[in-house]
Image: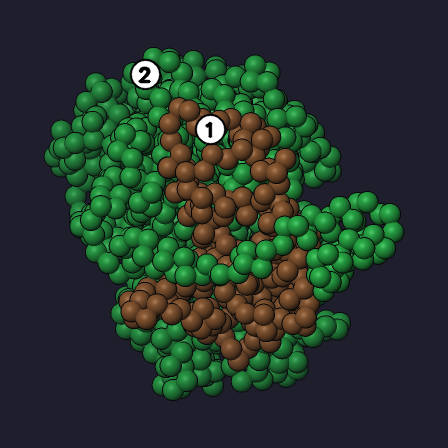
Chain colours: A brown, B green
Amino acid sequence: MNASSLSKKEITAMLRAWGAGEHEATEELIRAVYRELRLQARYQLRNERANHTLHTTALINEVYIKLVDQRAVKWENRGHFFALAAKLMRRILVDHAKTRHRRKRGGPEENVALEDVLKTNALAAPDEKALDLLALDEALERLATIDPQQVQIVELRYFSGLDVPETAEILNISTATVKRDWAVARAWLKHELTRGEKA
Amino acid sequence: MNEEKWKQVKDLFHQAQAFPVEDRVEFLDKACAGDTVVREKVDDLLGSYESGFLADPILHEVVEIVGAENNFQEGQVIGRYRLKELIGIGGMGEVYRADDTELNRPVAFKVLHEEVAGDKERVRRFIQEARAASALNHPNILTIHEIGSFQGARFIVSEYVNGETLRERMRGGLTSAESLDIMCQVATALQAAHSAGIVHRDIKPENIMLRQDGLVKILDFGLAKLTEADDLPIDPASPTVSRLQTSPGLIMGTVAYMSPEQARGQAVDSRTDLWSLGVVFHEMLTGESPFKGESVTDLVTSIIKHDPASLNLRSISEELKPICTKALAKDKQSRYQSATDLLQDLQGERKKMEYAIHTDRFISVSSTDELKTQLIRRRPTLSAEYIVTSVKRHKLATLASLAAVLFLGVGLSVYKYNGAPQPADLNGAFAAVIGPSTTEADLKISRFSSPGRMAQIAISPDGIYIAYITKDGGGKNGLRLRNRETLSDVEVVQAPTAGEFEDIGFSPDSGQIYYRHSFPPYTGNTINRVPLSGGPSTKIIVDAETGGSISPDGKMIAFSREVDRSPGSGGGDDVIVANADGSNERVLVHSPFAGPAWVATDQVPTWSLDGRSLVCWTVVHSPDPNHRLTILSIADGSMQLRDEKWWDVTGSVFMPNGSLVIAGKPMEAEKLGPSQLWLIDQNSPPKSITSDLIGYSNLSATRKGDVLVTIQNRSLIDLWSIVGKDASTATPITTSGELVGGGGWNWTPDGRILFTSSVSGNSDIWIMDADGGNRRQLTHDHGIKRVAFMTPDGRYIVFTNSANGWDPHLFRMDADGTNVKQLTPSGIGTASERIPRMSGDGKWVYYTQLFKEYPGKETPPNELRKIPIAGGDPVVLATNAGYVMDVSPKDGLIAFDDQTPPVKQGIRRVKVMSPSTGSIVKTLEFPQATAVGQMKWSPGGRYLTFVDQTKPFHVIRAMSLNGKILSKPLVIFQGQIGLFEWTKDGKQLGYARGTQTTDAVLITKKDN
């Protein structure tokens, strides 16, 4: 069974378009990546749970090789692909956190109007991790308006688990820049996430 | 913070980190030099920095989530469902395309995340609501088949919608007319749901699906119930209280469609859906959301406080703006109060717009202008087969005897390809999109851009390029080229000053595009060539009746030409080959018009894979003009014809294994359906690939055959009614464009409406109230059906059904759809699908019998017959009947089209028969311009009414039995109309009307 209903050629073309500034990656492309990612994830869970090491780059690389026509592809498409995969990771985690969060926060006393929630940022948190992710996601949205490259770095490093040299390669920037921006981004995000507490 | 400052902050942060903590203040005091904004930000960052924050990647969580989130995967069988392909992912869960193995139909199988589905009370409420919405049986609401669980996981099985979400469609851009049509359909669905007390709460483009044929389906009614944290006791009497449960992490997509009251966490009612639909409308019209914000907070603020973004785009018609504005009123009281109000405004605009679009042809009928065009250019028109027939007959009638060379082949029906396919081709066959075992469900159809307005398209053999011509700009359009890899899109040839471009094709090396330029008076049409790499185009051939196609080796071009057009001159059509640059023309075959057959110039000749022959289409006059697939040898011009008869062929392309995919409509009977895709293999009968209600034309494919490109012609037909004869009272009864073939409907004796709808995905018979409410589907089989009428006693419904698609017979069933009984005998031929009628005494059904063969006649005439409604043998009333008839409500007189030779040009002869004696009491002559239309007795039985289509806007006129046409028209419409029927009391007139859209689509194989 082929992992995707899109041909490698189509996926490659879509990636290129997306990399070239097309606003949104098409749903179809994301689906194709998701599907392959899921296959790989299942494979890893079955085979590597014992030693609990996940070769993260290997995972995404595996997906990449399965989906993209290597011969017809220019080098930068690989970057586009990893950037897309990182976005997908973020989306999966946030969606997941969201549904989990929604369900766990039931009950009349917690029926806070969105406006109030937003005003105070006072999030009674029955599930710390989920909330962090949701707040982090929004903070990233804000960061994107200031420094989109930093968001990419966070996505690649945090959501996709790439190391500094890999991230530098994907984004075609120096490792020094990655290191610096990574530090700034984390400080900025941390500040955003704790701003409400301090105020 | 601007870019420069931000850079400064970053640099200082970085530099300060190099200092020991205690020295940083001093460094920053100096470095910031009093810039407090920068200083504050740097301090914030330094204070917040923790080396451990986000240091551990959470990819492993992703793996845990996606790897283990449910127990489902492609290929798995759950009960009666086999999961085939993952088609959607999201916060709620995954969606698969699946097969219902019991009912043998495709379904959508939606899995709910454990987290979503865990709460029993919530699930119970969701199920209740989803079922209630589904039970409305509304054409625009997704039907849910089953809600079940499997190993602890919840799933929802619903009808499978072959199409795309509105979100996907919006990426291609929407016209105002298209947006309006979608809005109308969604509003209709909301109207039904709201009046049943069901609020959707989550209207957004992702929840609106657009089926291939244009039908809109709203998904996920009730699903919002699952994610609301509404744990308050439910009081069924109170309006639904929805407490918004959210957090800053809510994705923007969901927030964008929230109403102000939703965002405030206040009570939500049906008006919330109207707001959300307003947002959708704004987005369809402008391509952008009316409210913006960089964060959820900003977005919510904007929704609550700010005015929507302005609609100041020239492309948006002024009239649509107030609708959008009213739907987006912050205060619920100032908004549209009901979906009905909104729908009314939308319908009003839609009506105006339809009249305004002159370039859109109205279907069901064609004007005389078009007929003239047909005569000159002989291009068959969709859904107007009788025009095509009359055109071809005309041509036959004006020209005299037969070419021997053509007759040699007829009846031989040997059909084989010269030479075996090359090994490379065989390998390619596995990639081919259509093969011997392909069915419709295996095909993946994705739309090319320019919704609804595509004129011509072709894909390059290497699959990289698509050349196309749109209909935008009133038919004067240039040739455009899209690179499928880089998505670059350029105009390679500017629009012609006169005439138009058509018949696009690529050279085998994908280096050149060939196209035809046709222009009045259509005698000097040229075939031109333009290199893909740019540069001027060159005239290759002058005076071509079709476009040209290039031989597989790239050396030759084939096309056809009409020679000496003057009637009686012995002119005819030539199929010609020449060098690819146009030099050295050689006539392969000359087929004089003066014969019972000629090589059709409807279609560009197609080269066989080995380049030794051409596939053409021969029009054979007997028994009725029909197209035959013809193999024409390049070496000696000899021809071989296949047996199958086709009404119409609208495209053909070879697959790499040598089989031929064609778009065509088989002849065997008077089938109403449009051209479908068929696979023709060496010696087997044509195999049907698609059997939908969309017409296909303009086929091309890649060399590997893995991508097929075609144009889909969709007819959107609705039922309207007017009060009395006043066309200004026109009101739509249906709004989904769902009527099959523009006709097949009738009033019931108690004033309801029987109609043939495509809503189920097949043509089925439905019944509804006169206002369009209370719909019920009466048939469920796969045959192609067409409603005739309900008997006056209300007991039976008479209809035609064609189980195999081209062999219709007359049936009756009880008024509730049970006890189906075939009335007309099988074997001798078929019953005409066009409006059988009940006799005045309620005992007989009059119908037209078509024959496969008729003793002593080469061209079988039709017979007007009657058959007892109770069942029994038919009785012949007249021979040489046409298709159209009607029975007088006053005295039971039968008026019918008479085709007894000789048929006078430009005149339509109608006979009036007494049912008791069988004698003809009158013979009337109508002008030919009415022939395509219909004929109905006026409600009082004094006149025969007919559609006069000599004007762009249709008019119903009346002829008295003394043969005089009343000078004053009965009804003047603002557009063109299809099948019309008066109510028994004559107080209302119902009629079909619609538009035709053409979309280019790419067809590829689905992976299973």
Give the residue number, with chain letter if any, for mark 1. Answer: B244
In this picture, residue B378 sits left or right of residue B96: right
Residue A68 percent location from the top left of the image: 49, 72
Instruction: Please state the chain letter of the residue tagged with numbered disc 1 in the rendered image.
Output: B
- Mark 1 secondary-structure assignment: loop
Residue B157 percent location from the top left of the image: 28, 43
Q: Amino acid at mark 1?
A: Leu
Counting other residues with Cα less than 10 Å from the Cα at mark 2, is it few (<14), some (14-19), or many (20 or more)?
A: few
Instruction: Please state the chain letter of the residue tagged with numbered disc 2 in the rendered image.
Output: B
Examine the rendering and report whether any part of residue B801 can be seen. Answer: no
Examine the rendering and report whether any part of residue B420 can be seen. Answer: yes
Q: Nearer the viewer, mark 1 or mark 2?
A: 1
- Mark 2 secondary-structure assignment: loop
The quarter holding residue A66 reads: bottom left
Residue B708 percent location from the top left of the image: 46, 65
Q: Residue at x 24, y 23 (%)?
A: B791
| Badge count | 2
Residue B10 percent location from the top left of the image: 73, 57
User: Is B943 situated above or below B858?
Assistant: above
